[in-house]
Each structure stands twice: as C-alpha cells, then as structure tokens.
Image (tube, coloured by chain):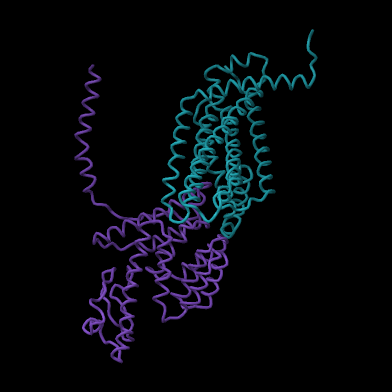
Amino acid sequence: MKWRLGFAALVVVYALLLSPFTGYLEKRPVEVKLGYLPHPQVLKVASGEHRTTVAEMAVLRVLFYFGSVLQKFEENVILRPEFMNMYKMLQSSLYLDPYNMDAYYFAQASFTWDLGRIKEVNHLLKIGMEKRDWDYWIPFYLGFNYAYFLKDYVQAAGYMQRAAELSGNPLFTNLAARYFYESEQTAFGLAFLETMIEGAKDPAVKSHYAMRRDALLAMSILEEAQNMYLDQFGGGVETLQQLVTSGILEDLPVDPYGGSFYLDDHGKVRTTSKLAASDQ
Amino acid sequence: MSQPHTGLFTIQTMYSQINVLVKNNLRAILRDRVLHAVLGVALVMILLVPSLSSFSMRQVQELSITLSLSATSLILLVVTLLLGSSSVWRDIERRYTASILTLPLSRGAFLFSKFVSIALFLILCTIVLGLGSALVISLASDSYPSDLPIHWGNICLALVGDVLKYLILASLAILFSTVSTSFYLPFFGTVAIYFCGSASQEVFEYVSGQFGQELSPAIVKSITAVYYCLPNLSAFDFQIQAVYGLTVPVAGLLLSALYALVYIGILLGLAIYAFGRRELP
C-alpha cells in the first residue's frame, strides 16, 4: 500500500513538474551552431563500415543548421551562417562517401550564390561527375556554374550537352543554346532556379532558392522597365525612382534579402544586399 | 554386437553429437530475453528508417538502404558480442561443461557446436532483419523514387558480407572465452579487434603512402605485421556497392569468402587447442 502511495505521489509530482520544466526549456536561449567534425581521415578510420551513414549524418547536420539560420532570418533575427564550416563539413562527408548526392546538391545550392566559391564547388562536382557517372544533375550544375558565374560558355555547353545525353531531356540543350548570352543572364538564372525549386524536396533549400528567384525576378522587372523607358523616352534612367515617376512601374520591387535596388555606374541594376549573406 | 571403430563411424557420431548440442544451444539462445530485447530494438530501428530517410534532399532511397544496412550490422555486432562473449567461460562457471563433458564427447565438438549455434542464430537474425530492411527500403523508395534502381542482389551481398564478418568476430569471442574466466576479456577484446579490424586497411594504406616515408622502417614493419595478423573486416564491407548499385568484383568476393573461412578455421583451431589444455573444475 505504501509503495502504491509513493508511486502515485511520484506521478503527481512529475505531472506538476512538466509545465515549469518545459517552459524553462522553451525559454532557454538556443545557440545555433554547426559544431565541428574531426579530420576526415580520422573520421573515415573511426567510422569504418558506417562511413556512408556518418557522411549522410554530417550532410543532414549542415542542412538542419542552415534551415535553423533561415528560420531565424524569417523571424528577423540575422545570424551569419558558418559558411566555411558548412563547406568543410560537406567536404568531409564527400571524403567518406564520394557518391553522396545530398552533399553535391547542397554545395551547389548554398556555396555558389552565397559564398561565391564557384571553383571549389566545381572541383567537388567534377569528382561527383566521375563517381556518379549516371547522374545528369551534376553536369547540369557544372554547366550552369560555368555559364552563369564564370562566363565560360564553351565549357558550359559541353556539360549541358552531357546532361542532355544522360537524361535524354533536350531541356538542357535548349537551356545551353538559349541563355548563353550575358544579356540573358537574369533569365538564365531564373530558368535554373525554377528547375531547382521544382526538384527541391527540403523546405529550407526550397525557400532558399525561392528567395533567390524572387530577388532575380525583381531585378528582371527593373531591367524590363529600363528597356521600356529607353523605348519611350529615347534615353536611359539615371535613378530607379524615375521608373515610378514616369509611370512605367507603380512601385519599386522589394529585395527579399532586405536591401534596396540601385543603378551602378554602368546602368546595371544592383542591390545593397548583394543578394547574399556575406562571407565570414 | 560391438560397432566397428571406423573413421566414418567416428565422423557420424561426432556429427550427431554436434547436431544435438547445436539444437540445445539454439533453444537456449532463442529463450534468452536479452536477445529478444535486442531484436525488438532492431525492428524499431528498422521501422524508423523510412521517416529518417525522408530528411535526405536527393537520395531518400539510398539513405534508406544505408540506414537499414547500418542498423542491421550494428545489431549483428551486439548479438555476436553478447553470444560470443558469454559462451564458454559461463558454461565453465555454471559447471555445465563439467556435466556435459563427462559424456563421450570431445571438447572440440563441444566448442564447434557453440560456434555453429551462434552462426545459425546470426544467419537467422540477418534473414529477419534483411526482410525488415527490404520492406522499409521498398516503402522509402516508393515515396521518393530514385534515378537508380534498387540493386537487391548487392543488398543481399552486403548482408552476406556482414554475416561473414560477424562469424569471424564470433570465433574470436569464443577463442577469448576459452581462456577467460569472466565476461571482460571476451567482450572488450572482441570490441577492440572489431574497431582495429575495421580500420586496419585504411591505416595500412595511409602508412604505405606518403605518411609512411616519415616514419621509421621498424614502425612501418610492425604496423604491417599487425595488419596481416588482424582480421581485415573492411573486406566484407559491400555497403557502398549496395547503396549505389556499383559492380562487385567476383574474384574479390570469392577471395574475401575464402579469407573468412580460413580465418575462422584458424581461430576455432586455436580455441579448441586452448580449451583442450584448460583445467576444468
């Protein structure tokens, strides 16, 4: 009888404790940190046969971390993502499992636009292309990076062609042919982002691409409005505000990264946010 | 009329003795509640695979195969350690050997029956966990189809590789168990060799390369000697071939299987020798 009473008392105390305990946990400041992985060689030796699992866990850790940073951004809490640490973690995971598509995908999604590490990402992608010789996504990413970021259209055409051969989808050939002009750079970027959003499964990555797409779309609207102004008035605008005062645009579009659009010395549309979180 | 003492008769007698002992041992293993709990945890782990795999951005099917094979391998390791480490010394402590070895039964047959019963249970676990894995891999793959087809043959091969690897570890645990008087040496000795054997190939390749030139030749030779003595467990790792459907070289596969059989033979031979010389209470 005494035991039963004691047990019942414990259950009651537990029930009473739950509310303050969970309240304390909810209010606790959360440090969004990626943490560190041991050296890849040490990790490979230590993880043994479980290295593919460890590699995937490292990629997911990067993804969850990035997701939490994006969530904070939506809540107007600006955190500078640990891009270099993220990159090193992905490199480590690819050392453990060079076939891991999640790592290539995330490297392409995050380190090209935000970090500008095009050559490093391309280096990773070339390893991926060698290993995953059946996968058309990797030459597609390479083709895009060469055309959009490096302006190397010859290399880009070759990779797009490879993507077309592997997938049997002429979309890649069309993309290569249609957008390999600098004047169409924004349209090329938009086409790429639409393809990536369509194929993205993870909400964090999807929202990351969508934000980039919205920013490019806003720039595309401004560039079209500039052309219309040129046609109507025979000269270019000096400030973007002229597009509104002339009645071509009702309002200036908003930069989803929180910056303001302006015209540089060459009349190209730029934004104060530079469309990316800055490198650390 | 007395039976003729021919070689064939001896083999037949030994076979029937081992058969009876294996059946008894298997009954004891199947009644073990700790193993029931371990297998329960294993099935829960495998059932969690589809939901865990859905976190992957581009390779849900591949992650489901990775996680299933990892979970299976981990559970087989636990089962091997539990069964192998508590095999012989516990029988001696409980004086089971004292009664069973009064029968016309050799110590070698007793030890071999222990190994066979552990091996059969490991195979049974692998089949059960393999079927569970097949189910969850199919489920994950149906939810997010991959560009790659599922290579069931490679997955089976990875499971066979696991069985061979844990059979080596089981025979190692039995060897430690024959010279030990407690749980510690068989358990921790086997765990240590599992980690060393899984990493030995990487370390050997590292030492054979650029890094080895900075070391003294004596150290390199000792590492090489340890590498040849330790069981090379990385030879039985076909996980990456199973996950991405890569080709498995047949010659390498046969060599690995032969290596496992020979290594198990040597370990069991040593165990029988050690057990034969041990003074039993």
Residue B105 lies left or right of residue A35; in this view the side is: right
* Figure quadrant of residue A207: bottom left
Above or below residue B180? Residue A134 is below
Q: Say if B130 sits above or below B94 in the image.
A: below
Q: Is residue B108 left or right of residue A261?
A: right
- Residue B11 is situated, as x and y percent measured from the top left of the image, at 74, 22
- Residue B267: image quadrant is top right
**Residue at image point 44% right, 39% down:** B45
* Foreground of the two, A51 or A19: A19
The picture quadrant where one finds residue B265 is: top right
x and y percentages locating residue A130 in the rendered image: 57, 63
Say which colour chain B has: cyan
> Foreground residue, A16 or A85?
A16
Q: Is residue A149 left or right of residue B218?
A: left
Q: In the image shown, does A7 or A183 lie closer to the viewer?
A: A183
**Quadrant in the picture for the C terminus of chain A:** bottom left
Q: Position of residue A81 (x, y in %)?
A: 33, 62
Residue farthest to the top? Answer: B1
Q: Residue at x 47, y 75 (%)?
A: A147
Residue A247 falls left or right of residue B230: left
Chain A's colour is purple
